[in-house]
Amino acid sequence: MSRYIQHVLIFLLSWVSVTCTAQSTWPSPEVEQMYNQAREYMTNGNVKQAIIVYQQAIPLAPDNPLLFRDLGKAYYLSGNYTDAHKTLESVIKTKEADEQTFQVMAACETAANDDKSAKKTLEKGIDKFPNAGLLYHDLGKYYDNNNDAPHALATWLDGIEKDPAYHVNYYEAARVYATTNKPVWAILYGEIFVNIESQTPRAQETRTLIMDAYRKLYNTPRAAVLEFKKVKEAEPSNFEDAVYTTLIHLSPVVLDGVTTENLTMLRTRFEMEWFSTYADKYPFTLFSYYDDMTRNGFFDVYNEWLFGMAENKQLYDSWNKFHAGSIQQFTLWKAQHKLIPAANDFYNNKKMNEVFPKKKKGE
């Protein structure tokens, strides 16, 4: 099973558990009851029984596309991609196709090794739902799987811009930026992702990615000092330059290495400089979150939560013994004060030629 199909399966399983009963006009209370029963089976993971109930309900309400839509998704979850595709194809012709309908339809086509059709389906879905982050994600994966990193990154950035709450696009963009000459975006997007999805293997992977991006930014102590002198008098012309310049100005803080302790000092000074210099011009939810944590006495703990395990598990365990209960207090606070990215956070110019410069002849 491809990672793309696994992604859709995981997303659909979570979707089933949180989605409310769709609003529709039912020919009888019995059909509506059957529909609700089928959805309850889906929520409980009994996909086979849900399929049976949907199949029984459809002859009683053959003009209701919701039954076909959810049956198609149930077929997909059961691994029956052929029937899922056939069922969803009819739904897409109606006005009842939602984002997941296009997503699952494309996943069925991918499972049938028809990537071109999957791409067209996702593009149709985006035309209908231009703010659906999950469709941009899956279209980006199409490009990524076809070794087209510029189009993949551009698509994920479109997803971040259109649907800032859909966090998986931050993960994908951070992964790409980590391999380029723009580690600042890897740091920012990676950190936003970890704040939204923090307890998964890819969250821990992203914590390491962020630390590596800081190391890449500063490169070596000598290079960092030289860069510091070069940009010392420069006037940033945009958000990215402002973040980069502020971080480079603080490079002496990490001259002896990018560690959790040094990053905590660096980022504390960054917050102070940012809010005294650029916060009004470039409001950014993540940096406002820094300020919120500082005011509540959690910023040092937050940095340990973010980087400690990524740097060294033994040191992290020792820190926890010395600061017993601090991480737990922070996570309880964080659960009540979640980072929610906003539409006006998007400052990326999306110029792929800056991220993937064309190689000169002979290189």
Image (cartoon, rainbow, N blue to C red):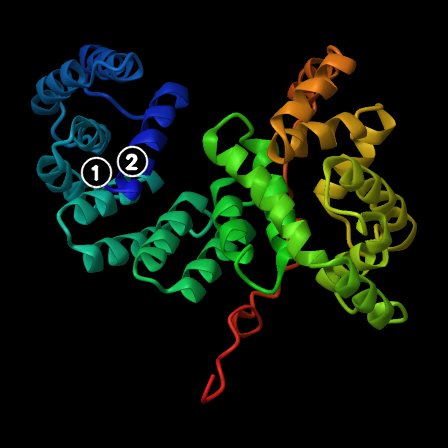
What residue is disc 2 on? 6
Q: CA distance from mark 2 to mark 1?
A: 7 Å
Q: Is residue 196 above or below residue 86?
A: above
Q: Is residue 233 above or below residue 282?
A: below
Name the side, left or right, on which 224 lies relative to 66.
right
Residue at 82%, 36% (x, y): give it: 291
Task: Pinpoint residue 25: horizontal percent, then vertical percent.
Answer: 27, 24
What residue is disc 1 on? 1
If you read the primary sequence from the N terminus, does the residue marked by circle 2 or circle 1 appear first? 1
Quadrant into which the N terminus falls: top left
Task: Pinpoint residue 220: horizontal percent, then vertical percent.
Answer: 72, 59
Residue 138 vs residue 176, the one in the foreground? 176
Label 1 near label 2: C-beta < 8 Å? yes
Q: Amino acid at mark 2?
A: Gln
Residue at 69%, 57% (x, y): give it: 217
Q: How many marks?
A: 2
Q: Amino acid at mark 1?
A: Met
Task: Pinpoint residue 262: horizontal percent, then vertical percent.
Answer: 79, 40
Bin the neighbour count of mark 1 within 10 Å (Cα to Cα): few under 14, some 14-19, many 20 and up.
few
Q: Looking at the rendering, which quadrant does residue 142 occupy?
A: bottom left
Name the side, left or right, on which 44 lies relative to 83.
right
